[in-house]
Image (cartoon, rainbow, N blue to C red):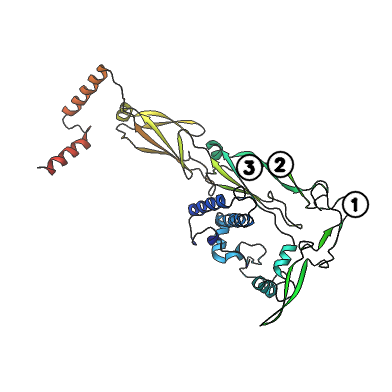
Amino acid sequence: MADKRDYYEVLGLKKGASEADIKKAFRKLAMQYHPDKNPGDRKAEDAFKEVNEAYGILSDPQKKERYDRFGHAGVDPNAGFGAGGGFSGFGAGGGFEDIFGDLFGGMFGGGSSSSRRRNGPRKGADIQRNLGISFEEAAFGVKKQIHLNKHVACDECGGTGSAKGSSKTKCPDCGGTGELRTQQRTPFGQFTNVSPCPKCGGAGEILENPCKRCGGSGRAKKDLTISVDIPAGVDNESVISLKGQGEPGHAGGPAGDLYVVISVSPHRIFSRRGSDLWLEIPITFTQAALGDSITVPTLDEKVSYKIPPGTQPETVFRLKGKGVRSLRSGRNGDLYVKVVLEIPTKLSSEEKKLLKKLDETMKKENGSDAYSKRKKFTEAVKDMFA
């Protein structure tokens, strides 16, 4: 964990950043370092994996809380951080040798930690794919298929890299250690430099007869179809992690992960704010003045709602529990209905006469509050210029 950067620093954020800020920063950096945009760029690939790892921790409330309290030790299952809140000491897998190996590149002999990590099992690369779904699929959940063309273990050699009947032999140059050592004299004394063996690439073994199908790599490209369960309540930029569905590992290491970034199509009449839905329904002047029962669509049914007499334009009504399920709480949000007064644009001469007669009648009514707002406004204007 010593070589890990702070996850907030990786995403360019300060500690305590909001969920929205974390999601926004992740999407920006994931797009910037995506392998499809940076083919063959090793630095971009490493940055992409680092960004995915940081987001995987900070986007999970429980992991984020542990990370905020204890740093990397709180989220690393191999860190020796137990339920009692303590740390395990320097064991066989770490200690001062690893620290000096990281700082000085193995110049103190005994084998560098970086070369051991390079020769030993390593996790495979992560993969990111975008997946578009409909508004309803995001609200209710859906199972989707993702098509991938990725590396898998070679069918011919079973992932060993050796042709059938052959095996690997100890590298004659490094004696199977995977490292070459040279002595270097400096003003501070004599040091031992350790570097990966160029003949075996640091593996310590060489192939007698490489597999012809994979060229000795032990891996081959293959088209795969993977099922993804999209939970109800996902939204734009939600990320679903499928463990072990990325590129295969190296030297027996675990496979990388598949990150599915969700893109939700907009709806014709609904808009979404978190787990709440919003809807605008046009009503007539008569419905607003006299009140009426209107039909309100939800995502899965139609419901009847009674608007009271004298309903004003832009009034918002709430239908509890008619929104989208929250991924965190598991409860449904609400549906907010805003009534919009629709003014007719084309009137016949008869309709115009009727409206004028209605207006005149309402103005003459003593004590009528039909135009109470207009009356107050007129009085206020008179007072201003009195």
Q: Nearer the viewer, mark 3 or mark 2?
A: 2
Q: Nearer the viewer, mark 1 or mark 2?
A: 1
Amino acid bearing label 2: Leu
How many discs appear?
3
N-term-proximal mark, 1 vs 2: 1
Which residue is identified by label 2?
A: 224
Q: Which mark is residue 165?
A: 1
Q: In x, y percent, where is residue 359?
A: 21, 26
Q: Is residue 319 above or below residue 38?
A: above
Which residue is identified by label 3?
A: 229
Which type of secondary structure does the marked residue at label 3 adopt?
Answer: strand
Mark-to-mark CA distance, 3 and 2: 16 Å
Q: In x, y percent, where is residue 93?
A: 72, 69
N-term-proximal mark, 3 vs 2: 2
Residue 59 sits in which quadrant? bottom right
Q: Which mark is residue 243?
A: none
Q: Is residue 263 above or below residue 171?
A: above
Residue lying farthest right?
165
Q: In x, y percent, where is residue 293?
A: 38, 28
